Image (cartoon, rainbow, N blue to C red):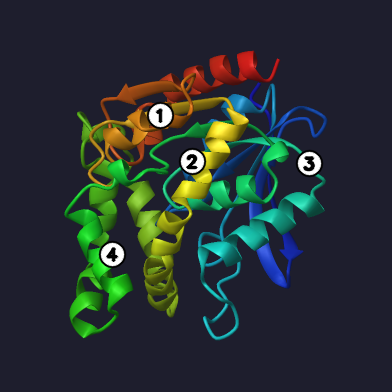
Amino acid sequence: MAPAVHHRTVTVNGQEVFYREAGDPQAPAVVLLHGFPTSSHMFRHLIPALADRYHVIAPDHIGFGQSAMPDPKDFPYTFEALTDVTHGLLKQLGVDRFAMYVQDYGAPIGWRLALRDPDRITAIVTQNGNAYDEGFVQPFWDGVFAYAKAPGPDTEAPMRGALTAEVTRWQYVNGVADPTLVSPDNWVHDQALLDRSGNDEIQLRLFRDYPTNVDLYPQVHQYFRDSQVPLLAVWGANDEIFGPAGAGAFGRDLPDAEIHLLPSGHFALESHLDTITERIRDFLGRVLA
């Protein structure tokens, strides 16, 4: 019988935060941090697959999924602000130490949590969650950095294109050997949330803030070198957003990092759930023992 997954909402820093939770609260904690343009929905199968051993928590970031979507006038849509909320949620839940699974936007939030209190992080699983310049694949990132450097109609247009159903679907199926393994429910679900009135401006603000994540990379690398935190990279090798060079780069600062490239794309969990689950259970079973 699969562990029960609870769907909860709490108020953190004045905002309603939705999260999925499963497993024994006394077990080692594993926090799952989703990317763009999805939500904790991306972990719907992984959560019960880990919850027999771990206390699993997967929040929706503010502006995503079922969490609050305040007007940008009322909430600063920056990665620092998203981290503040995640930090507040974990504090409210009494989660003092935890392993984390980071993907896409979840990575800079996770890195910020680690920089704030390195001793809280017991292990890291990164699934196309970038921390190195080598991971950026062109031309995808050219538009993001051009827009962040000089916001205006010309640079904004490509970024609005990234919010379309066509690109959302592309993120899921690009690089996947057998796209029929990826349920279309994924991009239909994500796109419905992206299409909410006002969500476009939220996403544009986060695009403009993205270079602040890159600015932190030297500090993140120093954290890796100082802590030698156990790290597992399970990476979609065909991702044209964060490429496989980004996975290999972890080994520069973490010589014991375990790096596995999978024949998949950006959302590798959709096509390789069993493989990734097996890798995670083996990895955490060893490093958290």
52 or 241, which is in the foreground?
Answer: 241
Residue highlighted by disc 1: 252
Q: Tag on residue 144? A: 4
Residue highlighted by disc 2: 221
**Quadrant of the rendering where the N terminus is positioned:** top right
Dot 1 and dot 2 residues touching (CB under 8 Å):
yes
**Foreground label between 4 and 1:** 1
Q: Residue at x 43, y 58 (%)?
A: 215
| Distance CA(mark 3)–CA(mark 4) | 35 Å
Location of residue 161 by image quarter: bottom left
- Number of residues whose C-alpha sits closer than 10 Å to that of mark 2, classed few (under 14), some (14–19) or many (20 or more): some
| Distance CA(mark 1)–CA(mark 2) | 9 Å
Q: Tag on residue 96? A: 3
> First in sequence: mark 3 or mark 1?
3
- Number of residues whose C-alpha sits closer than 10 Å to that of mark 1, classed few (under 14), some (14–19) or many (20 or more): few
Answer left or right for 88 relative to 251. Answer: right
Answer left or right for 109 relative to 38. Answer: right
241 or 274, which is in the foreground?
Answer: 241
Q: Residue at x 51, y 68 (%)?
A: 78
From the top left corner, tell me how far across and down residue 50 is, in percent: 61, 26
Q: Is residue 282 visible?
A: yes
- Number of residues whose C-alpha sits closer than 10 Å to that of mark 4, classed few (under 14), some (14–19) or many (20 or more): many
Dot 3 and dot 1 residues touching (CB under 8 Å):
no
